[in-house]
Image: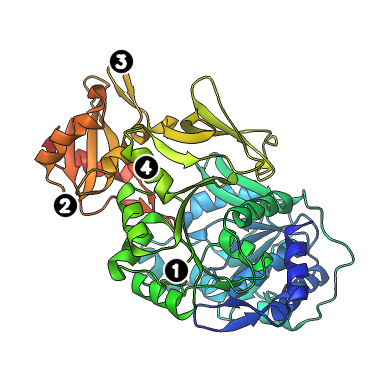
């Protein structure tokens, strides 16, 4: 059964229930959600969208973006997530690879990418936008457009208004699309010469959503507060209510809305949860599950979370290519760190997920939730994660990233092996190890960056108890915050490396 079919069937069973509460408090019932998805599907097919057509998607998280994306997939299209703010060269390289035939964007983005005065203003603020209205793939017909919001100057002539699609007929599909066909393309990394995009099918996405639901039960009466699609979709398939925070929601408003809407589940990246706990030391009593993901959760944040709520605090290990892989409770992770064991406990692989180690210790993964592969490349049978790990009684323990390895003489230092234990020391909120190359020797100066209230001299005395002698840092620096980037607030090791090169720290 396809992902869209699961959603349509659930909506048909509970048409009067509230499916979604938007950032401004507007409510959308399951019946209306179903009608809108089918209306968009019918409207796109009537306008000429063919199965397999890519739709470049530039719409921020909202009820409108949700129904539009689902309508595209229901019609057999492929949603292509390629951030237009990545810069013109990178965007163009991604466009050449994905070759979408359609573009869906907010009216304000069309205006901002086309009008000279608006483009100049955006450029002064460091945002270089491509001209979305004039996108064209060499050798292809001109791209078709869908705009979200009222028509503004700069919206291409002939663009389909989302509002018109929503008002159209919504007939039942005569057949479902192929569950193994591409449904979503997600650009993750790569250079302008070699961009990389993950291709998921409805089948792989449905398998992923099922794993979330199995580990974190959802059903009628539950309220999930998140802006994350991969937790919002299992919410809807389960008949629960998705509570969307508004864009640019402050931590204080995020937790206030959780309380007002009776949230039972929420998802945060660890840094965001720390900001929420700064604003509200106690989380609403309605919560039963707090899911953390997108980045390792330091022990300090896990301890604060378990003190702030009686809900089960879970940390998910996932990659864009395969999600989720493993889920561990805060108690399990803290007990692992307290035992003095090395590395970051990720938990046992979820049902159906295969995990094994290559000869060099790299973690290899497989399962029904594995993506089809990278766009333009051979399909995957197994994913080489780039993560180094060990398997202990069926549990995955992360020991580092291959690309983050530091060289110190004949010793190979993997930061991920030591960072969780350092972050668990008193007065340390977060910790990261980076190398600053020594042009004279080729070795790397090992710099430990920490945040918190720790005294550097005391920290140096404590490090030998949790760090191998050959891995002790050459310098320790204390920062107000570790540099992070993107919506997931992932640690930016390149920026941290630059900071470490400029920062005068304390010799280790």
What residue does disc 4 label?
335
The residue carrying mark 3 is: 410
Give coordinates of residue 451: x percent, y percent. 22, 50
Label 3 to label 4, Cα distance in Å? 32 Å
Disc 2 secondary structure class? loop
**Under tag 4, what secondary structure?**
helix
Q: Residues within 10 Å of mark 1 (few under 14, many from 20)?
A: some
Q: Is residue 146 left or right of residue 188?
A: right
Residue 221 shows in the view: yes
Which residue position holds label 1? 119
From this view, report whether residue 249 is shown above or below residue 395: below
Rounded to the nearest angstrom, the CA distance separating label 1 from label 3 is: 52 Å
In the rendered image, which quarter contains the C terminus? top left
Q: Mark 3 falls on what kind of element?
A: loop
The mark nearer the N terminus, 4 or 1, is 1
- Which residue lies under the disc numbered 2? 453
In the image, is residue 226 above or below residue 468?
below
Q: Residue at x 54, y 64 (%)?
A: 131
Disc 4 + disc 1, Cβ < 8 Å:
no
Q: Is residue 99 visible?
A: no
**Position of 165 relative to 205 (above/below):** below
- Spatial separation of the CA atoms under disc 4 and disc 1: 53 Å
Residue closest to the far right: 174
């Amino acid at each position: 059964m396809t992902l869209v079919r699961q959603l349509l069937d659930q909506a048909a069973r509970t048409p009067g229930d509230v499916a979604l509460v938007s950032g401004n408090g507007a409510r959308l019932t399951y019946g209306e959600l179903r009608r809108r998805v089918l209306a968009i599907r019918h409207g796109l097919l009537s306008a000429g969208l063919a199965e397999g057509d890519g739709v470049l998607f530039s719409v921020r998280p909202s009820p409108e973006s949700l129904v539009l994306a689902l309508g595209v997939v229901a019609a057999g299209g492929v949603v292509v997530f390629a951030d237009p703010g990545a810069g013109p060269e990178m965007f163009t390289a991604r466009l050449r690879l994905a070759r979408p035939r359609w573009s869906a964007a907010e009216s304000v983005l069309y205006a901002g990418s086309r009008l000279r005065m608006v483009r100049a203003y955006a450029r002064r603020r460091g945002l270089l936008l491509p001209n979305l209205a004039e996108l064209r793939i060499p050798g292809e017909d001109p791209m078709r457009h869908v705009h979200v919001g009222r028509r503004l100057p700069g919206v291409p002539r002939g663009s389909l208004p989302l509002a018109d699609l929503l008002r159209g007929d919504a007939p039942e599909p005569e057949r479902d699309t192929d569950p193994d066909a591409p449904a979503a393309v997600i650009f993750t990394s790569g250079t302008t010469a070699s961009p990389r995009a993950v291709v998921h099918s409805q089948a792989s996405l449905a398998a992923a959503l099922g794993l979330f639901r199995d580990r974190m039960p959802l059903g009628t009466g539950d309220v999930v507060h998140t802006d994350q699609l991969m937790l919002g979709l299992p919410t809807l398939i389960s008949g629960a209510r998705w509570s969307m925070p508004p864009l640019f929601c402050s931590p204080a408003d995020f937790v206030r809305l959780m309380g007002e809407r009776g949230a039972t589940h929420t998802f945060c990246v660890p840094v965001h949860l720390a900001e929420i706990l700064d604003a509200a030391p106690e989380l609403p009593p309605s919560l039963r599950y707090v899911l953390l993901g997108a980045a390792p959760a330091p022990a300090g944040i896990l301890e604060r979370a378990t003190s702030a709520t009686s809900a089960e605090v879970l940390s998910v290990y996932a990659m864009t290519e395969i999600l989720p892989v493993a889920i561990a409770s805060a108690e399990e992770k803290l007990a692992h760190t307290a035992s003095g064991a090395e590395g970051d406990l990720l938990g046992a692989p979820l049902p159906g997920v295969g995990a094994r180690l290559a000869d060099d210790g790299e973690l290899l993964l497989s399962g029904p939730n594995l993506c089809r592969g990278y766009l333009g490349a051979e399909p995957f049978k197994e994913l080489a994660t780039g993560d180094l790990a060990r398997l202990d009684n069926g549990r995955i323990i992360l020991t580092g990233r291959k690309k983050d390895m530091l060289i110190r003489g004949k010793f190979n230092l993997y930061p991920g092996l030591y960072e969780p234990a350092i972050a668990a020391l008193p007065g340390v909120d977060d910790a990261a190890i980076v190398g600053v190359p020594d042009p004279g020797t080729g070795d790397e100066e090992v710099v430990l960056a920490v945040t918190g209230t720790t005294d550097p001299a005391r920290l140096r005395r404590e490090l030998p108890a949790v760090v191998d002698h050959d891995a002790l840092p050459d310098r320790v620096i204390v920062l107000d915050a570790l540099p992070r980037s993107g919506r997931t607030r992932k640690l930016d090791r390149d920026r941290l490396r630059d900071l470490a090169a400029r920062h005068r720290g304390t010799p280790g």
